[in-house]
Amino acid sequence: MVSAQALVDALLQRGYSFWTGVPCSYLSALIGCIDGAPAPRYLAATSEGEAAGIAAGAYLAGQKTVVLCQNSGLGNMVNPLTSLNEPYRIPTLIITSRRGGDGDEPQHSFMGHITGSLLSLLGLPWEEFPDQASGVAPALDRLEDAMAASHRPAALVVSKSQIGWKPAGTQQKAGLGPGDRRTPAPPGTLTGPFILPASDRISRAEAVRGVWEALSGHEAVIATTGKVWRELYSLGHRPGFFYLLGSMGCASPVGLGVSQGFGREVVVLDGDGSALMKMGAMATTGRYSPGNLTHVVLDNEVYETTGGQRTSSVTTDLALVALACGYRWIRRVDTVVGCTEAMLEASRVPGPRFIHVKVSAASDPAMPKFCKTLTEMKLDFMEWLKASGKRP
Ligand SMILES: Cc1ncc(C[n+]2csc(CCOP(=O)(O)OP(=O)(O)O)c2C)c(N)n1
């Protein structure tokens, strides 16, 4: 058995300052060492896909990242791994358990059987976690080399009882580590009823322009998949804009990750379908309460990009969800000037803030094609973040 703290120390030495993930009992000692500890920073995500998004954002803001998960959660991560980490070349070190060994519970056996092949199929270099402490540094070195060469994630696969509180033979520590002692924030404020009848709603593009009018040029803006990012791009690209062409639902996790390493404002432009897909990320945002984050949801009540099918936003009030999740300031708007004013006011109050914009399902069929490669856009964005305001 390898001591969890020794593994944490080895990774801290290599600069892995930002960790996120979802627990597995095989990793409980590891999480116990870091949750609530001063270093590394650990954000508990609500799903592994969300964790991949948060880690990607933290990476963009200049941090080396670790994602912890159970192998069941690798399934939840496949979409961001294939449509965010892979095309944008965003590495992260995944430490996954391998449940499903002999005698384990039946729900784990199939994923246990395919864990290695799934990682290989995803094109990720991976290693079995070493049995001896002396094997840890060489395994980490090999994975680091692989990530440096490919700019893609790599994985360590941990079997039962390989990581514990203390080296084998010594007494197990009871319970968990310091833990994250965060208390719920006092209730946020929710203002601004929608004023327009549904038939008079502004278009999503108009709302994007309303938001854009309020930008000072110093914010990092993360725009979601579908047409939202295209509508932002059509107003003129800036190096502080990051477009998520895929990884639906990951705009707010990526924004949360960026907010952790970036000293200035971060704005997330989301759709209702995308926000609903990873609604757990709103709970994580409320929990970790980034003061510099504004989450704007452009709610047309449909998946407009895929043909206008209804989403659940008609019956799920996203502003109330944000309030319940612990966002500090929430505003409902449905006019262009309302979008601009809400953005300006948001920049003056502590975050996280949530702007819920009701829009129509209309969109312009003719939109510009993106003229850079995704890796060029990523590198520009990373350089801009670095030059514009790294958090001390
Ligand atoms: C994981 C995943 N599921 C489904 C899709 C297909 N898809 C692309 S855009 C989109 C709709 C997004 O809806 P919303 O966020 O409400 O934005 P809108 O298109 O209405 O502006 C869907 C379902 C996808 N790209 N990725």
Image: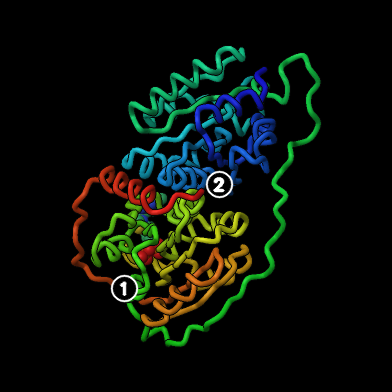
Q: Which type of secondary structure does the marked residue at label 2 adopt?
A: loop
Quarter of the view holding residue 21: top right
Q: Is residue 45 left or right of residue 376?
A: right
The picture quadrant where one finds residue 266 is bottom left
What residue sits right under mark 1 in the picture?
Answer: 209
The x, y position of residue 296, in whole percent, is 45, 67
Q: What amino acid does circle 1 point to? A: Arg
The residue that mark 2 highlights is: 47
Residue at x 38% of width, y 76% of height? 359
- Tell me what residue is drawn at x 55 percent, y 46 percent: 47
| Distance in Å between CA atoms under marks 2 and 1 | 32 Å
What secondary structure is found at the residue carrying circle 1? helix
Residue 88 in which image quadrant? top left
User: Is residue 88 visible to us here?
Assistant: yes
Vertical comparison of 298 with 52: above or below: below
In this orientation, does residue 361 appear?
no
Across and down, in percent, residue 133 comes to: 61, 15
Residue 328 vs 206, above or below: the answer is above
Viewer-proximal residue among 117 and 236: 236
Q: Residue at x 63, y 71 (%)?
A: 188
* Residue 342, position as x, y percentages in the image: 46, 76
Q: Amino acid at mark 2?
A: Ser
Q: How many marks?
A: 2
For the N terminus, the quadrant is: top right
Q: Earlier in the sequence, mark 2 or mark 1?
A: 2
Q: Nearer the viewer, residue 175 or 240?
A: 240
